[in-house]
Amino acid sequence: MSFFGSIYRVLLLSFIFGSFASCGPSPQAGGGIGGTGSVATVPTVAAGPVTGFGSVFVSGNEFDTNDAVFTVDGQTNAGEGQLKKGMVVLVNGTISKYYGTGQAVQRTAKTVLYEDTIEGPVQSVALDGLSLVVLGQTVRINQSTIIDLSIPTLGSLTPIDLVEVSGFVSGPGTVVATLINRKGGAADYQVKGFITQHDKDLKSFTIGSLAVDYTDTDISQ
């Protein structure tokens, strides 16, 4: 698949993640442990950053992953060990609740999906260390952003460095990062974001300041 085909492929996932990110990083299923009475098990979907392991914690809520199927960056049958804190994941599963109270008893994951928000070369790093530009997207950093140990300091990054960013698209050309990790090996360029300046005749659009030509891209899906 071409570079632009790869970009277009992940745009669909952008809408999936973006629909949950617009409600904030907290999972859609809520509640604490407690209550009495019978238990009902219902489907649940959650999206948010990984905050812990020993099972997988998503935005602080624990999901049992003993029977879960993991897909990490397109690799099916991946393992939980390939996840890192700060990675934004999409979880499909079930939640058991005390009937009549809605209080959670247990969350169980059936599938766990992770895809980069951005993967590509660093273009620049702000002097204040609070943002960087990757593939035409401004990546903003806050107190919750995890900088992987593979990056001693953001100032040490150069235009030849490849990074992967996980986070939430917060506006055109802007991503709030939950994890920034140095990427080794060959790059698999990926961008998620809002399309602007779409020209259906020229088959082009922009995402942030990145110009995309999809003339030879398979868009059948």
Image (cartoon, grey):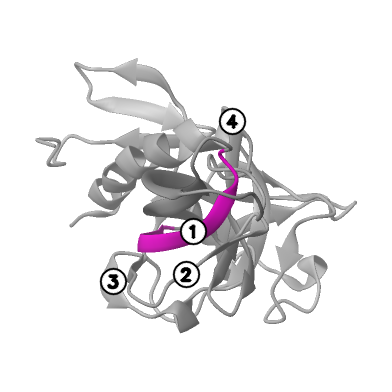
Nearest to N terminus: mark 4 or mark 1: 4
Determine which residue is flagged by label 3. Answer: 75
Name the residue nearer the viewer: 203 or 27. 27
Q: Nearer the viewer, mark 2 or mark 4?
A: 2
| Three-letter amino acid code of the residue under disc 2 | Asp
Distance from the alpha carbon under mark 3 to that under mark 1: 24 Å
| Three-letter amino acid code of the residue under disc 4 | Cys
Residue 188 point in image, percent of width and height: 36, 64
Nearest to N terminus: mark 3 or mark 1: 3
Nearest to N terminus: mark 3 or mark 2: 2
Q: Mark 4 touching mark 3, by CB under 8 A? A: no
Q: Secondary structure at mark 3?
A: strand
Distance from the alpha carbon under mark 1 to that under mark 2: 6 Å
Nearest to N terminus: mark 4 or mark 3: 4
Nearest to N terminus: mark 1 or mark 2: 2
Distance from the alpha carbon under mark 4 to that under mark 3: 27 Å
Determine which residue is flagged by label 1. Answer: 107
Residue 74 point in image, percent of width and height: 29, 64
The magenta span reads 102-115
Residue 181 point in image, percent of width and height: 61, 70
Distance from the alpha carbon under mark 2 to that under mark 4: 23 Å
Determine which residue is flagged by label 2. Answer: 64
